[in-house]
Amino acid sequence: MFRTILVLDIFDGIVVHAVRGMREQYLPIKGASSVCETSDAVEIVRALNPDEVYAADLNRIRELAAGDNFPVVRDVSNYCKTILSCGIRSAEDALLGLEIADTVTIGTENADFNVIGQACELADDASRLHVNIDLMNGKILTNTKIALTPLEAVDKLNDYPINHLIIIDLTKVGTESGINTGFLEEAVARSDHPIIFGGGVRDMDDLNLLRDIGVAGALVATGVHNREIPVEMLRE
């Protein structure tokens, strides 16, 4: 079953509108949404009633002094399944995230393959772990020493007992600029893990295209907030 997953980018306790990965410029989502009149994560989830959300804790991802958004994510998890992205930098960070959300994704932005391997070993159930490959201008966005191409990283991750591989093209997030289908087709062909994709997903045509090329699910936000993707798609 194809999954349409609502993204909640959470910064300083509220949901913000992500555009092109320029996190310092993100503004409260209520100013960009035609489906909700709030930037409160729990109120958005109660209003839209998604089956599943991808919650990105931007305070932790950016390693800001303001701390984390774990209380917000914990509250959201009472209403729907939650994939948590929280800037994991160690296996212990992953275990902490698993106390809060249904599943946790380890991003290559802040974690290397040693961290991924250690988290898989220490977690009681490695199937609750995903890995994020975040792309910026066609390359892996990373603060570590990862020096692989995106497809090389896809190949390498086949050796790890994670659940899904999540690929996000941050260059296209919030832009509705379309999808690099050639890259995704190659990634699907080479990955032993189901792939969830986010970044530039515009409308139903894009969702159908992703499904047709074998992607397992899509991360969506802007397309829902501007009504190009019906809210009902979040409940299938």
Image (tube, rainbow, N blue to C red):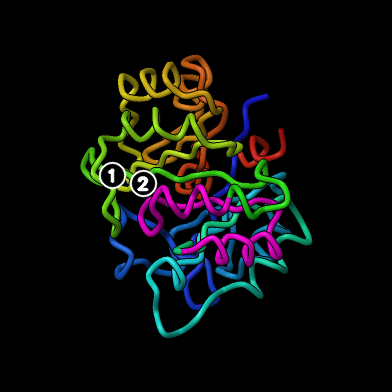
Name the residue: 68% across, 24% down. Answer: 1
Q: Give the range drawn in magenta.
A: 90-119
Q: Mark 2 points at which residue?
A: 134
Task: Determine the secondary structure under disc 2.
Answer: strand
* 212 displayed left or right of 151: right
Task: Determine the secondary structure under disc 1.
Answer: strand
Residue type marked 1:
Ile
Disc 2 or 1, which lies upstream in sequence?
Answer: 2
Name the residue: 63% across, 42% down. Answer: 231
Specify whether residue 30 is in view: no
Pointer 2 with pointer 1, Cβ within 8 A = yes
Q: Would you identify the image quadrant in which residue 183 lies? A: top left
Q: 10 Å neighbourhood of mark 1: few (<14), some, or many (≥20)?
A: many
Residue type marked 2:
Asp
Name the residue: 39% across, 27% down. Answer: 155
* 2 displayed left or right of 112: right
Residue 140 circle label: 1
Q: How far apart are marks 2 and 1 (CA)?
A: 6 Å
* 171 displayed left or right of 14: left
Image coords of residue 191 (percent x, y): 46, 24
Between 110 and 195, the one lying in front of the other is 110
In the image, residue 63 sits, relative to residue 170, either above or below, namely below
Specify whether residue 185 is in view: yes
Image coords of residue 28 (percent x, y): 45, 69
